[in-house]
Image (cartoon, rainbow, N blue to C red):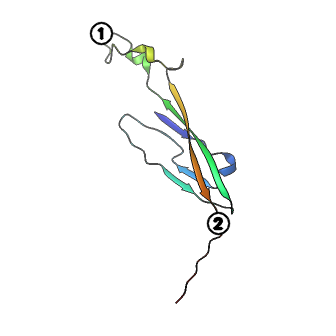
Amino acid sequence: MEFDWKVPEKYVNEVGLQPVKAILMPNQEQAIVATFTALKKKNYEIVVPLTVKNLFDYAKHFVGFFNPGSGLNLTQRGTDEGTLTLKKSIQIIGAGNDGSVEISP
């Protein structure tokens, strides 16, 4: 599968996601590091879209004697390119405030 985060241009300095785009093979894991840095004194509600594509090649699994995986249900095909695309989003809710430190003996 391939995933791709699209941070809105307006919030590119406040929200960071690493990696922004990657391809994952079967049974592979990928840690995502997310950072939120409030630059203004205000409440934030940011929606960050995520696009995920299934890169499974259905053409390689047609029924055939010499073809491993033959007999798979081909009625579950995605688009004409053979990929399935899923769009989700995460909502980031945060607040920026004046920082202060108070120290007493």
- Report which residue position mark 1 lands on: 65
- Rendered view: 21 above or below 102: above
Q: In the rendering, at what x and y percent does residue 3 appear?
A: 51, 37
Tag on residue 97?
2
Q: Residue at x 60, y 42 (%)?
A: 6
Q: In the rendering, at what x and y percent does residue 14 appear?
A: 63, 55
Q: Is mark 1 on a helix, strand or loop?
A: loop
Q: Which of the pair 94/14 is nearer the observer?
A: 94
Looking at the image, residue 105 sits to the left or right of residue 73; the answer is right
Question: Alpha-carbon neighbours of circle 1 within 10 Å: few (<14), some, or many (≥20)?
Answer: few
**Total numbered badges shown on the rendered structure:** 2
Q: Residue at x 43, y 48 (%)?
A: 31
- Rendered view: 51 above or below 92: above
Dot in front, 1 or 2: 2
Of label 1 and label 2, which has the lower sequence position? 1
Q: Distance between the residues labelled 1 and 2?
A: 66 Å
Q: Can residue 99 be seen in this view?
A: yes
